[in-house]
Image (cartoon, rainbow, N blue to C red):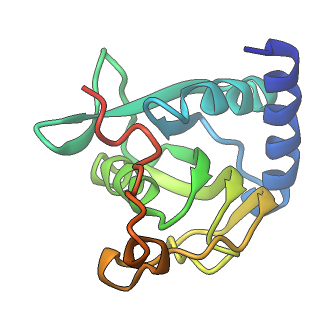
Amino acid sequence: MDPILAQGLGADLAALLLPLLGKRDPAAVVAPAVGGVLVAHEVARAFGCRSLFTERQDGTMVLRRGFEIADGEPVVVVEDVITTGGSTREVLDAVRGLGAQVLAVGSLVDRSGGTVELGAPRKSLLTLEVPTWPAESCPLCAQGSKPEKPGSRGLR
């Protein structure tokens, strides 16, 4: 909704990730569709490289739409929000499966309190501790509340 704000957040996240890259420049920034698309675009703008996104095809995260990553190509993976790291791991698997070298992972918000392990150095602009529970041990569910699933995982 606010392109100026998005550009600033992308630049801030790129600056935060820069020390994690060593002396390598990313050739691409990759994110999961839908939530990470604009984040990838703005971080890629700040790094001066390509912006790519993955999508689920038959339940698996893949690059489509003519996007390509060369074997050994250095990439950064970004997200809007990390909670469990599930979508981010799927993107990491997709790009590593194509031979990419993941330099770092970034997100605007980390709702895991910094506890999610992704197998790559990572930073977030905002880190929060947001408790999550399996449905069988959720105190709100026990009181009759109905869960609402946020995010874009179920979009088609």
The answer to whether residue 22 is visible is no
Q: Which residue is rendered at x = 40% and y = 37% of the image?
A: 152
Residue 143 spot, x, y in % from top left: 43, 74
Residue 94 spot, x, y in % from top left: 31, 48
Q: Which residue is rendered at x = 54% and y = 63% of the image?
A: 83
Quadrant where the N terminus sits is: top right
Quadrant where the C terminus sits is: top left
The residue sitting at the bottom extreme is: 137
Work out whether residue 29 or residue 83 is closer to the camera in this orientation and state it.
83
Q: Which residue is rendered at x = 72% and y = 33% of the image?
A: 43
The answer to whether residue 77 is visible is yes
In the depicted structure, whether residue 155 falls above or below residue 59: above
Answer with the quarter of the image where residue 130 lies.
bottom right
Residue 74 spot, x, y in % from top left: 55, 47
The residue sitting at the left extreme is: 58
Work out whether residue 40 or residue 82 is closer to the camera in this orientation and state it.
82
Residue 39 placement, left or right of 119: right
Q: Which residue is rendered at x = 55% and y = 45% of the image?
A: 75
Count of marks overlaid on the render? 0
Answer with the quarter of the image where residue 69 lies.
top left
Work out whether residue 74 or residue 155 is closer to the camera in this orientation and state it.
155
